[in-house]
Image (cartoon, grey):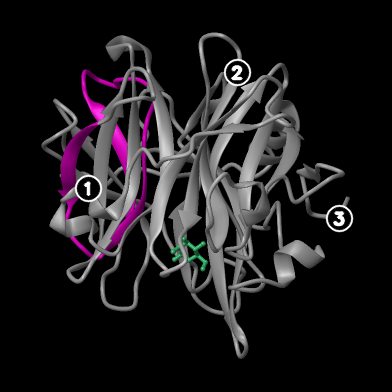
Amino acid sequence: MEPAELFRRYDHNPLFTFRQMPYPCHSVFNTGATLLPNGETLLLLRVEDLEGRSHLTVARSEDGVTDWRIEDRPLLHPDDGDPYEAYGCEDARITRLEEEDAWVIAYTAYSPYGAGVALAKTRDWKSVERLGLMLAPNNKDAAVFPRKIRGKYWMLHRPVAGSLEHIWLTDSPDLRHWGSPYCIIKERGGPFWDGRKVGANTPPIETPEGWLILYHGVKQMPGGPTYRMGAALLDLEDPRRLISRLPHWILAPHEWYEVTGDVPNVVFACGAVERGDEIHLYYGAADTYICLAYAKTADLLDALLAHKVNSRIPAGVSY
Ligand code: BMA
């Protein structure tokens, strides 16, 4: 284990390459993940086709590690007819909404208009209802919280404002109308690992200490960007209150499959599942492979609680 890393890698990474796919494709990476009621792990793989566009395809496994059964056709595809997805459906974050007995999928809808945030809903992973584009371009890295807070749905997202790329919160009464923008985690600027931009990775994970947020930070290097992962904690009953943000990264590209590929020096998770006292993180490596890493939830929380911040919500901000 690397000194700062709280995740340990699966011994047989990469977990998936394009070679495991049941149909020809270029690469498979950045996957959403969820646990099904029967205990199986379901992944929603980002698959880049041989033309260069991405679609989203379901894979299932009993133990979340071996014997993957991969659907032979996509669940969400850029040719399904939505003009805002004409260049691709990318980077799905899956949230189980118990109150709705459904899963909501937040994904990047990429088109000639730019990259925006779209939502879709499914109950059976066979059919899917597109709720449509929710946040106009340029905006991505959206992930819905797994339950209502103060009677509303909440979502993390990452708009692009000039050269600034911070993580924001928004809320909604119905998963369709989103408002109350609130900036929660800023890119740090300067030489820091999260200086150039930040964005949510997995959907928030509810813990007794707060919402555990796993996010990526980008540092611009002369040879290109380096994508690493960090962690923060938000208040359970008011996620606008930042409890803690680790100053250092917790997973960084070091292995061959993370430093070589279509985009070198990238670890980029979209999904995690909780199994026992561990978080199983499914992450994209170098925009080419899917990998797996594990961390003890308690280790992440211990580290975070040692770095509490004193955040206050400015007067004048209301719900
Ligand atoms: C981000 C996203 C990810 C990708 C990452 C590294 O902007 O588009 O899909 O993994 O860049 O290339």
| Residue labelled with disc 3 | 3
Q: Earlier in the sequence, mark 3 or mark 1?
A: 3
Distance from disc 2 to disc 3, alpha carbons, whole Å, reads: 32 Å
Q: Which residue type does callout 2 highlight?
A: Glu
The numbered mark, 1 or 2, whose residue comes first in the sequence reads 2
Question: Tag on residue 58?
Answer: none
Q: State whether the magenta stretch is mostly helix, strand or loop.
A: strand
- Does 37 sit above or below residue 231? above
Q: Nearer the viewer, mark 3 or mark 1?
A: 1
Q: Which residue is mark 1?
A: 80
Residue at 75 percent across and 33 percent down: it is 299
Kind of residue at badge 3: Pro
- For residue 119: magenta? no
* Residue 126 found in image quarter: top left
User: Which residue is found at the position 78% from the left and 49% from the top?
Assistant: 13
Which tag is nearer the camera, tag 2 or tag 3?
2
What are the residue bounds of the magenta stretch? 129-158
Q: Earlier in the sequence, mark 2 or mark 3?
A: 3
Q: Vertical placement of 313 versus 298: above or below? A: below
**Residue 15 in view in this figure:** yes
Q: Is residue 141 left or right of residue 291?
A: left
* Residue 119, image quadrant: top left
Image x and y of residue 203, in percent? 45, 36
At numbered mark 1, what does the secondary structure look like: helix, strand or loop?
helix
Q: In the image, 42: left or right of 239?
A: right
Q: Are marks 2 and 3 in contact (CB under 8 Å)?
A: no
Q: Nearer the viewer, mark 1 or mark 2?
A: 1
Residue with the mark numbered 2 = 40
CB under 8 Å between discs 1 and 2: no
Residue 177 % position (x, y) = 11, 37
